[in-house]
Image (cartoon, coloured by chain):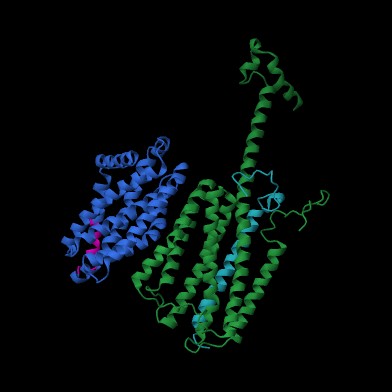
């Protein structure tokens, strides 16, 4: 691909303030998400057959498994971004980290909710304590609830980035230990072992599940783009606010100086003292005259 | 190694003089044990079979208070500044703080063990296992807690965040320590030593993570 | 269709939660973007010399 520099006379397209985080690409993606959900529902409820054993409740798989994958993807993004925050000392990655965590938390929550609802008719229990994947997911969910809660209470952006990166990474490193402890604790698991590999699923069911992955991936991408832009705008709004406050202070100080120059003798003893007057005094006087 | 001892000794001496943990946290532990007894209606067989779980849940509550105390003695007089300026490596300060927390927790656990024998009629079938499991679990709680304590307590951050951060992380310790005690107090037929090894893994993992991460956290403490 | 209640609950929770989150994202974005000048709205088009304290890309 040829690298060309943009001609200077071509105006850079700017985003108007107040127009939000949407762009042409993200709007197209959003429409694709809506269409995707509609098509997925047609496949999930009309075109696919019910399972012989689980009957119609098997249709939950088309949202449960994609939710799980999306949730884990969010947490993986947070983990990678946290490493980059600590390594590159970069706040840019911190925005990615919190975007991943928030969206990961949403999808993990949905995975737990659909899992609970699915568990009732199939296992005859809302919650199965002995299930390793369920318990591990719940622990990960709670760790990231704490992560987001923690982010709300640390005022300084840099300290927040560093420390929450540590919390996210410790939470992820903890996963194998949680997994092992729950596995031993329960020493059995109800969860159906990956239905994908054993050829149990029919072709159309498999296709619909794959479609679920694609649709959820699009929704995930849409959310990630918008959440990242919000994070970016938050930082920019803070910077702009800070600069405005500093400009105000500077203007105030300059006005005070002008005041002092215009009315010598009021709180400005050095100017009034003839013994101290010298070439140095010409500076402020000139500026005062020009103002 | 000298710095580690110095930090630990400093914390323990402060505790010896102020008696905050001894006069507030230790009675709290005993109260919780009594409350569990009352809540479970003192059905002795139930109480006895639940002893390991109740014991370690209580230890987790106590650990949160002890860790908050451990951090607040540093923040109260901005002593973290002094620790940082002392030039000691971050991991040494971490090890010293964790050691002091572990020592205090072990003392409280000793009293609590006496308590469950008296109140819940527990008996030690395998004292070596009980002591080893308690040691490993306490090191695990103290290391994870010391890291999260300095992340969450004081420093303008609300203290209420510590349990939210720490308890999910310590869930595997609760599971493993309870199971090891199940074997040691023979309330359930499990392999307690396997659980002990899991506790040791956890303790080692958090000792390493804490040692590495503490320097980063101390930078902006 | 069997288990219709469970299916409505499961799919309903998922679709409603995703829609609510998407709406909240759009709203947060609009509020924030009103406070930021045009040239800084997007990370990609923010000038490099803009004061982005602590940012390493």
Image position, residue A65 (x, y; %): 52, 74
Q: Which chain identifier belongs to the cyan chain?
A: C
Q: Is residue A117 magenta?
A: no
Q: Is residue B37 magenta?
A: yes
Rendered colour, chain B: blue
Image position, residue C19 (x, y; %): 59, 69
Residue C33 in which image quadrant: bottom right
Residue A262 in which image quadrant: top right
Q: Is residue C54 visible?
A: yes
Q: Is residue B108 placed above or below A122 in the rendered structure?
A: above
Q: Is residue C47 placed above or below A271 in the rendered structure?
A: below
Q: Which residue reaches farthest top? A: A275
Left or right, B138 with reference to A233: left
In-front residue for pair B82/A3: A3
Image position, residue B86 (x, y; %): 40, 35
In-front residue for pair A9/A45: A9
Left or right, B108 with reference to A65: left
In-front residue for pair B183/A167: B183
Q: In terms of secondary structure, what is the magenta stretch mainly? A: helix
On the rendered image, what quadrant is the N terminus of chain A found in? Answer: bottom right
Q: Which residue reaches farthest right? A: A9
Q: Which chain identifier belongs to the green chain?
A: A
Q: Is residue A106 visible?
A: no
Magenta range is: B30-42
- Which residue shows up at 60% across the image and 86% down it? A46
In-front residue for pair B144/A30: B144
Image position, residue A208 (x, y; %): 59, 80
On the rendered image, what quadrant is the C terminus of chain A found in? Answer: top right
- Which residue shows up at 41% across the image and 43% down it? B90
């Amino acid at each position: 691909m040829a690298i060309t520099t943009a001609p200077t006379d071509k105006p850079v397209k700017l985003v108007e303030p107040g127009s939000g985080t949407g762009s042409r690409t993200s709007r197209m993606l959003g429409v694709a998400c809506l269409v995707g959900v509609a098509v997925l529902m047609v496949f999930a409820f009309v075109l696919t057959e019910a399972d012989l054993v689980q009957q119609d409740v098997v249709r939950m798989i088309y949202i449960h498994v994609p939710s799980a994958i999306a949730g884990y993807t969010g947490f993986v993004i947070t983990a990678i971004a946290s490493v980059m925050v600590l390594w590159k000392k970069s706040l840019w990655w911190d925005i990615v980290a919190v975007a991943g965590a928030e969206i990961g938390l949403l999808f993990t929550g949905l995975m737990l909710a659909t899992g609970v609802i699915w568990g009732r008719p199939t296992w005859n229990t809302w919650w199965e304590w002995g299930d390793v994947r369920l318990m591990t997911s719940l622990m990960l969910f709670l760790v990231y609830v704490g992560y987001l809660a923690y982010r709300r209470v640390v005022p300084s952006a840099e300290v927040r980035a560093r420390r929450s990166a540590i919390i996210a990474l410790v939470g992820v490193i903890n996963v194998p230990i949680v997994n092992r402890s729950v596995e031993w604790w329960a020493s059995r698991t109800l969860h159906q072992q990956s239905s994908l590999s054993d050829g149990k699923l029919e072709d159309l069911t498999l296709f619909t599940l794959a479609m679920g992955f694609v649709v959820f991936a699009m929704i995930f991408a849409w959310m990630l783009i918008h959440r990242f832009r919000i994070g970016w705008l938050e930082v920019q709004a803070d910077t702009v606010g800070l600069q405005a406050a500093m400009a105000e202070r500077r203007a105030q100080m300059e006005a005070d100086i002008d005041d002092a120059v215009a009315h010598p003798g009021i709180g400005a003893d050095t100017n009034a003292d003839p013994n101290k007057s010298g070439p140095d005094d010409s500076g402020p006087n000139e500026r005062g005259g020009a103002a | 190694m000298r710095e580690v001892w110095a930090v630990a000794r400093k914390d323990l001496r402060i505790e010896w003089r102020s008696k905050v943990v001894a006069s507030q946290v230790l009675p709290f532990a005993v109260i919780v044990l009594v409350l569990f007894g009352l809540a479970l209606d003192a059905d002795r067989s139930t109480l006895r079979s639940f002893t390991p779980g109740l014991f370690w849940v209580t230890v987790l509550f106590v650990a949160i208070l002890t860790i908050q105390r451990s951090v607040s003695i540093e923040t109260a007089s901005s002593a973290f500044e002094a620790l940082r300026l002392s030039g000691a490596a971050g991991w040494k300060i971490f090890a010293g703080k964790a050691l002091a927390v572990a020592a205090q927790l072990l003392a409280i656990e000793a009293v609590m063990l006496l308590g469950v024998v008296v109140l819940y009629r527990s008996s030690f079938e395998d004292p070596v296992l009980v002591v080893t499991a308690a040691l490993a679990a306490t090191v695990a709680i103290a290391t994870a807690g010391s890291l999260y304590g300095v992340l969450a307590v004081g420093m303008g951050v609300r203290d209420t965040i510590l349990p939210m951060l720490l308890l999910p992380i310590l869930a595997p310790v609760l599971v493993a320590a309870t199971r090891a005690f199940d074997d040691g107090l023979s309330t359930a037929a499990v392999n307690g030593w396997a659980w002990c090894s899991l506790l040791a893994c956890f303790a080692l993992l958090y000792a390493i993570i804490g040692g590495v991460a503490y320097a980063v956290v101390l930078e902006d403490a | 269709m069997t288990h219709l209640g469970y299916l409505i609950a499961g799919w309903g929770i998922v679709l409603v939660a995703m829609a609510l989150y998407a709406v909240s994202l759009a709203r947060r974005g609009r509020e924030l973007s009103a406070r930021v000048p045009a040239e800084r709205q997007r990370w990609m088009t923010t000038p490099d010399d803009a004061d982005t304290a602590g940012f390493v890309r």
